[in-house]
Amino acid sequence: MKVERLGDRVHYLPGFPYAAIVVTDDGVVSFDGPMLPGPGRAWRRHVDAQGPLRASFLLEHHMDHVFAASYLEPPVLISTERTDADFYATTESEEGARKRLLALDPDSAEEIAGLQLRRPDLTFSERLTMTVGGSTFVAFHAPGHTPGSMVVHAVEDRVAFVADNLSPGLSLAFSMGSADVEGWFPTLALLESLDVDWFLSGHGEPCGKEELGAHRERLLETIGVVRELRDRGLSRTAAEAEIVRMPIWDAWGRSARVPYAPTPSGAAPPVSRTAGIARIYESLDQHTPTSTKGPDVEAE
Ligand SMILES: [Zn+2]
């Protein structure tokens, strides 16, 4: 296990997803963590060696994020209210989550059988500020990659933990599967406003503010292409079939830094990669006026 650092106090573990801690003057605060038991155990040893764990933040409800608290056993696990409400939206149930974990890591069968998912102990709706060992953490409900996503600004350390709201190591097509499409834009503006040097993402190396513009552009381009197909009268399923044949599909399917195997021609694209198109359709449906006629304005 190779732990990386941003300065002395911010440690992160590249993995699926990226895990991170801030070592304060009086204990440790953690952000997400490894999904599988082996890396989970190793990360726990590293965290314990830095001091007592005071709190953990669960940054979103996806299955690769929710198991970390079972390994780290923090005294308090914090999420947004929406993440807590969506807790079983992708794992279906405790049993379903364990089955999917087992499929990924059959060698850890015994440990997985005894794993209990940990639900958040403390939730907030908009913003929460916490001080630990003289370090300030400001947590924001920041929808985008998921409706309940959270961003935490470690003020003195000039880092924001953004989970998959930025995902330089994950394709956008994959990342939009349960997105709050229009909510993502104010979140990018929030990230722009934070006084930080680094964003630590759930998938991909730490990045700076240059990633914000690139991400916004990719989102707008994706929405634009889907809108055009929808305006031509295509159903969502027809649009999915059409998009796979368009040159842009490869660009969405591929992340900036991770090789991606394209969908073989003739094969249906995996749902994990087309679900984002459904999210964009829903968003456009909600925001398209039923009449193109403007409001009646009486002449003065
Ligand atoms: Zn996710």
Image: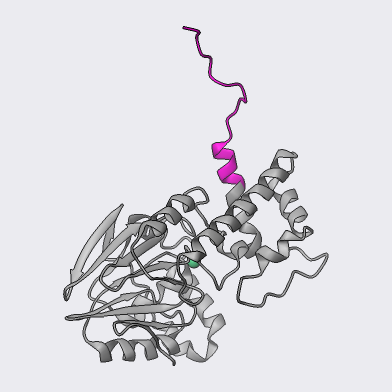
Q: Position of residue 125 (x, y in %)?
A: 30, 52
- Residue 104 sits inside the magenta stretch: no
Q: Residue at x 18, y 68 (%)?
A: 131
Dominant SS of magenta comes to loop
Dividing the image into 4 quarters, which one contains the N terminus? Answer: bottom left
Residue 143 shows up from this direction: no
- State whether residue 108 is above or below residue 28: below
Q: Residue at x 28, y 59 (%)?
A: 123
Q: Position of residue 249 (x, y in %)?
A: 72, 61
Name of the residue lying farthest toward the top: 300
Residue span colored magenta: 281-300
Q: Residue at x 33, y 67 (%)?
A: 119
Nearer the observer, 299 or 129: 299
Q: Position of residue 2 (x, y in %)?
A: 44, 91
Nearer the observer, 293 or 83: 293
Q: How many marks?
A: 0
Is 176 on the left-hand or right-hand side of 136?
Answer: right
Q: Position of residue 8 (x, y in %)?
A: 30, 85
Q: Residue at x 24, y 71 (%)?
A: 76
- Residue 288 sits inside the magenta stretch: yes
Name of the residue lying farthest toward the right: 266
Residue 142 shows up from this direction: yes
Is 236 on the left-hand or right-hand side of 32?
Answer: right
Indicate how the structure is coloured in the image.
one colour
The answer to which quarter of the image holds residue 177 is bottom right
Is 295 on the left-hand or right-hand side of 281?
Answer: left
The answer to which quarter of the image holds residue 129 is bottom left
